[in-house]
Image (cartoon, rainbow, N blue to C red):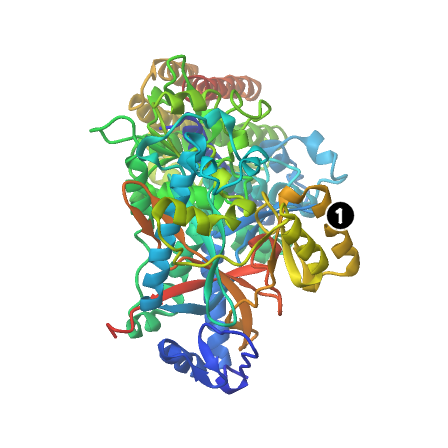
Amino acid sequence: MLSRVANSIYWMGRYLERAENTARLVNVNSHLLLDLPRRVKLGWEPIVDILSNRELFHSFHEEVNEHNVVNFIIEDKENLGSIISSLSAARENARTIREIIPRESWEQINSIYLQASENKEAIYSRRQRYEYLKNIILSNQLITGLLAGTMTHDEGYKFLRIGRNVERADMTTRIIDVRSASLLPDLEHEQTAFENIQWMGVLKSLTGYQMYRREVRLRISRPDVLKFLLLQEKFPRSVSHTLNQVDECVATLPKSEHVHSSIGVVKKQLLQAKPESLKQDKLHEFIDEIQIGLSDIHNELSRVYF
Amino acid sequence: MSIRWNNYDVANFHDELVEKCDSPRQYAQDLCVYLQGLSDNEINEFKAAADSAIHVMGITFRVYNDEEGSIDRAWPFDIVPRLIDKKEWQQIEVGLKQRVKALNMFIDDLYNDQKIIEDGVFPADLLTKSKNFLPQCKGFSPPLGVWAHICGSDLVRDNQGTVYVLEDNLRVPSGVSYMLENRLVMKRVFPEMFEKYNILPVDDYPSELYDMLAQLSPRKGIEPEIVVLTPGIYNSAYFEHAYLAQQMGAELVQGDDLFVDENDVCFMRTIDGPARVDVIYRRIDDDFLDPEAFNPESTLGVPGLMRAWKAGNIGLANAPGSGVADDKVVYAYVPEIIKYYLGEEAILPNVPTYKCQDEEERNYVLENIDQMVVKPANESGGYGMLIGPHANKHDHDEFRDLIKADPRNYVAQPMLILSTAPTLVDTEVEPRHLDLRPFILSGETVSVTTGGLTRVALRKGSTVVNSSQGGGSKDTWIVDMEAQ
């Protein structure tokens, strides 16, 4: 397999995953806001913090409000992390490897991008936004299914899964970091009911609520949620699971020792740190380390294969 | 209004489907009856279905314009097919094979003994001034003696019904993927018609191409590693490069993916390390192919490729230097070339062509420029030409000056009245001019696509069919009327 092709499939996987995760995050935030009392200033800042940075945001918009954030996060082409930018990058990558991926999956990637660009007015109405984002999420699931069901599970497919899972690990850690930071300090004692709702929000942004309830029947609590999202090996969006997936794929590739050991480093960090017992500032440091570890994995992949 | 053949005015044109008002040609009768039976709603529905198929399949080409930069455009497609009777097609096919065979012998001769010049059939100074003659290829003959493995020849029909060859594209002809895709779109849109007619299939092309390329492999007895070399996603024909690679199961590579080592062997960079490449179907122009041998600025090509090719370690299709026969001045000599190498008369006629190099012919062109089509020798895509009858006096004078300054670089042809075919305009049909580009593959044997790509000038009265200049395409059906 050509190195350039491996690189393109990897990034196609990452960008598609990024678009889907972003769509989930925005949808959950829209719902969450409806449940919170007005005086709780949760708003849209965390979304900007999770997905980008405030400096970039403020170079386009003054006020952090729903309209501006939605514009910035979903349709702004200047923001390379926006949904439209991600879909466009996924499509450009797919275009350079059209001959590698099954035709239907290219058609689907092309059409999700075209639909998302053509209907973007919908994102400013809450009702239509929900449908718009749901469509993106389902399209990506459809692409995932098409690829799983019709593409030869060869090295190219492995690079796709590696890209998807590296991106997913990155997104899960970002959500944990920002959400827990913005949640806890203000709300610690008086508003446990709302804290509960917000942890539910965290789980829901990762579509983990239902699975969490099946696993942990107790009342939602911070340590349990953290443990679930970081360490639960069977939940497909937990950091542990994604790392195992990457490791499993890498094992089938040539010359994989260095990548394997860079994955091992992060796995070890996860197991040793007992993240569920970390206080907020320590948690933040810990997540930082994990993020650095993830970027090392990416760098190793680039160095060896791309 | 839906389609009414008694409103369809063929004027003084030869129409491919309709002989005269309300009287379709015999092989087009079923189609015309079917189309007439469609309501406006159905027509719009079919058009929308075709558009959406094209949209979703991502059938695009890239155009460059100053405001938007490089953008992807869907390729305009007309749902009324162009029909050719199989009996007529077989004649054309024989003529094309003859032509390409002779052209390949001509190229091989030019780079080696130059007998045709020695024998006074082809003027030596035409060669010395040719931009596409590559001195780097002198004294070399590729395997099988074939240079132009893939040729796209443009055919037109005049108002007397005669089919002419308008030009031969021997460098990197494009369009074959649209021919294949158009058929898929038609099958999605008009499945009923495929039951009524015996339409010869076109989908064999990628296999034929693969087989031909495999014959060029220097390593016999093992499955060759064949790659398609593209300039990248910003090339106007990128869609086609990817499409053909996909259909052949070959790797699609860019210059950066390949390298030639010190033993003149070509490799591609893979996740397992370097892997040897046997055959390259290159879609990069000669000049950019190898910065060591040609344009040193090129970042699209592969340094050392010419070394590998001349050492016999890699097959290249088309061979570098094939373009020497793809020149509008050489074109004028093709009937003589066929006669010289094959001892046969050309089966397919050339459009009468005036060589501005020749003083007498040049004077004729300068005097009658308002009646002629003037073409530069080495341009393609319809760029840099003058269509006399459609141009104004200022343009005429400008071209007179251009011709006088560099007569070798220009040829002129009388303005042909191109044939037409019914083309949808809203929900009615109107005649629009068209041409046909079949593709000819030459390896151990020579084969021709079934039909080819029909390009149609969508603007009323226009004869410019190029996709970059307002052209569209139609599916081309070779129909077997005897098997009906």
Residue A255 seen in the current view: yes
Q: Is residue B436 above or below residue A301?
A: below
**Residue A304's quadrant in the figure?**
top left
Residue type highlighted by circle 1? Asp
> Which chain is disc 1 placed on?
B
Q: Is residue B101 above or below residue A238?
A: below
- The residue at the point 40 percent across, 49 percent down is B338
Crowd around label 1: few <14 · some 14–19 · many ≥20 (10 Å)? few
Location of residue B64 in the rendering, given as x and y in whole percent from the top left corner: 63, 46
Q: Nearer the viewer, residue B209 or B143?
A: B143
Q: Is residue B180 above or below residue B16?
A: above
**Residue A62's quadrant in the figure?**
top right
Location of residue A96 in the rendering, given as x and y in whole percent from the top left corner: 47, 38
Q: Secondary structure at mark 1?
A: helix
Which of the image's four quarters has the C terminus of chain B? bottom left
Q: Is residue B319 left or right of residue A64?
A: left
Residue A134 seen in the current view: no
- The residue at the point 32 percent across, 37 percent down is B213
Location of residue B399 in the rendering, given as x and y in whole percent from the top left corner: 72, 51
Location of residue B453 in the rendering, given as x and y in whole percent from the top left corner: 44, 57
**Residue A232's quadrant in the figure?**
top left
Q: Is residue A260 left or right of residue B420?
A: left
Q: Tell how many labels.
A: 1
For this orientation, the residue located farthest to the left is B221
Q: Which residue is mark 1?
A: B401
